[in-house]
Image (cartoon, helix red, strand yellow):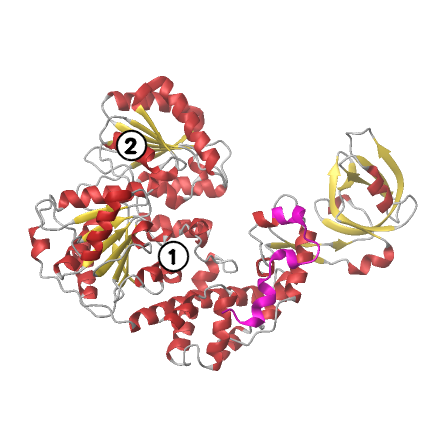
Amino acid sequence: MRPDILNPLFVEITALKGIGPQLAKPLERLGLARAIDVAFHLPTGWIDRMRVDELRMADTGRVITIVLTPTDYRSGGPRSPFRVQATDKHSNYVTLVYFGGNPGWAKKLLPLGEVRVVSGKLENYGQELQIVHPDYVLAPGESASLPEREAVYPLSEGLTGKRVAQLAEQALERAPDLPEWIEPSLKGRHDWPDWRNSLVRIHANPADKLARDRLAYDEIFANQLALMLVRASTRKRRGRALKGDGRLRDALKLPYAATGAQRRTIAEIEGDMQQEQPMLRLLQGDVGSGKTLVALMALLSAVEAGAQGALLAPTEILARQHYETITRDLVGLPVNVAILTGRDKGRAREATLMGLADGSIDILIGTHAIFQEAVTYKNLGLAVVDEQHRFGVAQRLMLAQKAEHPPHLLVMTATPIPRTLTLTHYGEMDVSRLDEMPPGRQPVETRVISDERLPEVVDGVARHLSGGGQAYWVCPLVEESETSDQAAAEARAAALKLRFGDKVGLVHGRMKGPEKDAVMEAFQRGATQLLVATTVIEVGVNVPNATLMIVEGADRFGLAQLHQLRGRVGRGEGRSVCLLLRGGALSETSRARLALMRETNDGFRIAEEDLRLRGAGEILGTKQSGEARFRLASPEHLQTFLPVATDDARLLVDRDGGLQGERGQAARTALYLFERDSGVELLRSG
């Protein structure tokens, strides 16, 4: 249960004064649903209002506050802006401009001949000075309330900075004084204010570095503490030691030898599984580094020891692909492999469920369906989770509840994760890295081309297809809207079909599972040669004959995503090419991103750069996965404070009596405040 002291902050946003349905919409777009969301919606900058007593050309571009007297109204008709002529005390002229066709309001604010204090951005229009829509127009007696420094907040359409500031003020009134969770000497060393004081200070003065650092530290500390509690709880529980005898692995006939990195990782996993403490290991490997072989060896090791293994994939396409690969690799071995996805219904599903319950199925491959209530295992010893960033701490816990003894857990990700983020999102796990490529993997040649050369690109595709090659054409990511991604893909596919006819297939996220699989399957067996897709093909699709990847609107994608897409080619013997089509107006960030893609195929380097350019939440896909995000801590804060927060959390767990002592009780509140309370739940259930 959340401590009562925090309840005022967790009320719905509608509990704040002045919020009706009209305002709820733009607030929702910003993710502000409760008072705490507004309190944590920190300003990103500030405006300094410069008080002046004379209008000067030299001040154009600045926000000024000045005493003016309106002298004349000018209206050029219903569609023209309404203009108020005004003078300062030295008789210099300025025009105050109001758009929107209703002069009544401006006349009421600025009666002719009456002195007013006006604040807004001074601009130069031709030879005249003007202020468009002044921020403030006040009678002289009210001007004392005008702030000299004003916070600038992230906004969405229909919201003003002033409105957000008023809501923040109400949210801050609800913020209680909380007991201190930071270790005293650490707090003293940094000269940090108390938690509530920091929050008030940052809204009043966004330049307050001490307050900003303190809040960022709190959030990182709560995150690290939650992961440490998860780890401690898992370590306390007894799993089963699984020691395989090697009979299945020795019988496995592979067409290639394992790399040194694969052999090292397989040995680490084997060592973990032979312990009674359940394994918690993250396996990071770049696209094509051979994670599936490592997972297969681990699963066979579990089966040799008399246990069952489960492999969880994020999408149905990927689950079926794993199933086919693993079934093919295990031909002739006495291992029973089954698949279970949300689509499997009726008798087939029943037969699979019975086989799991009676132990006749050794390895189950599937999507989230494999952890539903109805699915019971006779003896689940190892769970392998592919593409980790779609599965949060909460899902990892649900898995542990699936067996009498918590199963060993191996998590694989093809998104190389910077070390900082590995600590913040998988702090409870040991990490293995596959940092060398199997022999024969070709680096992909990457070119960046302006989208004005689209006809040339299509001609190039025609030559590629006529030589028997296959290609992907990925359509641009459209902000916040799957439907327009889909529309872009459908329009592109229709245009390409005019030229290439039935050689073109189309796949997007809104298609039903069977439909999507049929298209993928046709592409895999070469019945179609050009696959037009949205980013649904980003993860794990394997067609070695496809050696050309075209990404349209590449400047709209993040680095990690471009790297994943590029990884769909370069899987066979042939030379592979990735064409990144870019728009005309590139931001600095997009330019840097595309240059890096051209320069390197190293996923770990790309990940570090991506963190620098974009921030943490997006790299791990947490914006999509519902996993806890960092709202107050920037990537720079993570770099600076992560090691300190990790040590401080460890100190609390090991020395200061965990959550039982005085500081521990305060830290428990912090876990709830920053919504990292899965750690607290664990202590209760464990």
Quarter containing the C terminus: bottom left
Residue occupying the point 47% across, 35% down: 483
Q: How far across and down, in percent of the image, does residue 509 sit?
A: 39, 37
Q: Which amino acid does label 1 sit on?
A: Gly
Q: Where is residue 586 in the image (x, y as percent from the top left)?
A: 49, 36
Q: Does the magenta stretch include residue 17?
A: yes
- Magenta stretch containing residue 73, yes or no? no
Q: Nearer the viewer, residue 381 or 67?
A: 381
Residue picked out by circle 2: 518
In the depicted structure, whether residue 224 falls above or below residue 375? below
- Above or below, 52 against 658 in this view is above
In terms of depth relative to the viewer, which is nearer, 643 or 413?
A: 413
Q: Which of marks 1 and 2 is nearer the N terminus?
A: 1
* Disc on res. 392: 1
Q: Where are the magenta residues, as a range?
A: 1-26
Residue 121 versus residue 323: which sits nearer the camera?
323
Instruction: Tell me what residue is drawn at x 62 percent, y 56 percent.
Output: 13
Which three-letter amino acid code belongs to the residue tagged 2?
A: Ala
